[in-house]
Image (cartoon, grey):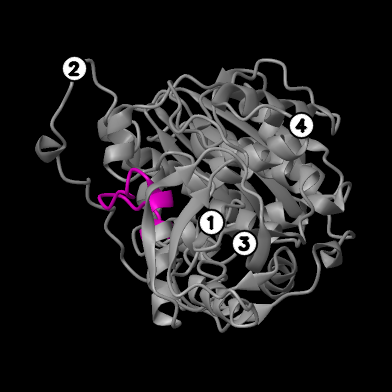
Amino acid sequence: MPGRRTLAALTAGVVLLGGAGAYATADVYDLVPGVLTLDRDIDPDTLPEVEPEPEVTGLVELPTAVRAVPLEAVDAEAPLPDQAALAAAIDAELARPGWYGAGAVVVADGLTGQVLYEREPDRPVTPASTQKLLSGVAVLTTLDPHSRLTTSAVRTGPDSIALVAGGDTMLNPDAGDPTSVEGYAGLADLAAQVVARLAEDPDRPAAVTVSIDMSYAAGPRYSPHWNMEDVAMGYTQGVTMVGLASQRPRPFFPSPPEPEKEVVAAFAAALTEAGLPATVADEPVLTGAVSGRRLGAVRSATVAELTALALDDSDNALTEALARQASASAGGPTDFEGVAQFILDAVTELGIDTSGALLTDASGMGYEQLLPARVISQVLTLATSGADPRLAPLVAELPVSGLTGTLNDRFLADSTRSAAGIPRAKTGTINASIALAGTTVNRDGRLLTFAAIAYAVPREGRLEARLALDRLVAVLTECGCA
């Protein structure tokens, strides 16, 4: 019944985009980190080139952009797969190359949470970036998903202005772009507000110096559990509460070490362009909260949209920034391990047993982190079942197989392309772990969730393991198993 399945697949999310994700190289976020974990210091210039992608024999046709109906519209009357038949199909896949004899897998019904298949569900394994699903839970259940992050400007003296960072790490140095999550708020817009407001003052300054208040959700910049070579290579950046959209970290294109100074310089340039000559203060970064009359403010895309982008791009830096803000807003800690515990506490409060979990950050960049596949599976079914409506963005905007985000170049091999466009999933790769967790709709129209982690993969086997996980999800999608 392919027609029925296709309709159900479109109802399992919110948007199918007619193009690739934000970065052409987005999947490298979940492909390379961990390669750099060596027993000796290395020169990044001596690193090997990124391994080639598997040969692609054909491409799926990209669908026209579609806005689907809510998740609840998935056919609840579609039959559950026969568990014995489903187990036989999955076991056959796990016996094929790519798993290296070590896989933790949980498959559940997306509407009821009933577990349909499990192998080593309670074994703590390295989750890689599928850990971001838990971080998304903490963000969406703590912050208002419809709220926005505010960047403001305050007059701190006769001829001084301070930006006040409010968590938006994707400011547009020019005018804001309301059609894009990245760069939604613009410094040129803020500068125009400031100039207009000062024009009303009898003591309007002829020129100003600019600084920035970085007191909001302040905390350490780098985790002691990170390999700093990963930062130097652009897989993440130090956690900060402000930044420019044009300077988001990308593999092989690292962010500036102090993004706040780049923002101050960009704002001074925007003020000058708007008619108020501005220079950067000698010591522009202020650690204490400033006071004064607010001259203007710009706001980011919504927290739900920012969280969806973090998952779609597997953006380590954005995930860390959002999770830290969520913890701070609840009166919690802002150090890495404190935020990690806040995330586990948020998941536990939803009724999920997090026994066996060990987290040291929010993004999955720490190599020693552990998480049972069962926990990831239960987080997914909480979102798909509608038990907590706040979690809908967690699954509705996940990368789409063969189309968007970190799945834009997946499910294109002959053995998997039949499922392209149906599964939505969070990817993960670090050291020996290759992971995939998300949703699919099977041949009979039943919504399923899956969490699969190959946890003993040698470096040279990463692409083979990635294909093995894609094949497993393709089997779930193709197998009615009724």
Sooner in the amino-acid sequence: mark 3 or mark 1: 3
The local crowd at label 4, few if under 14, some if 14 to 19, many if 20 or more residues have their Cα within 10 Å, is few
The local crowd at label 2, few if under 14, some if 14 to 19, many if 20 or more residues have their Cα within 10 Å, is few
- Please state which of residues 167 and 128 is positioned toward the viewer in this rendering: 167
Sooner in the amino-acid sequence: mark 3 or mark 2: 2
Tag 4 secondary structure: loop
Sooner in the amino-acid sequence: mark 4 or mark 1: 1
- Outermost residue on the front side: it is 202
Mark number displayed over residue 331: 4
Number of callouts: 4
In the rendered image, which residue does mark 1 sit on?
A: 162
The local crowd at label 1, few if under 14, some if 14 to 19, many if 20 or more residues have their Cα within 10 Å, is many
Mark 4 against mark 3, which lies toward the viewer? 3
Q: Position of residue 191 (x, y in %)?
A: 52, 74
Q: CA distance from mark 2 to mark 1?
A: 43 Å
Mark 3 against mark 1, which lies toward the viewer? 1
In the rendered image, which residue does mark 3 sit on?
A: 152
Q: CA distance from mark 3 to mark 2?
A: 44 Å
Instruction: Give the main secondary structure, helix, strand or loop, of the magenta stretch.
Output: loop
In the rendered image, which residue does mark 2 sit on?
A: 40
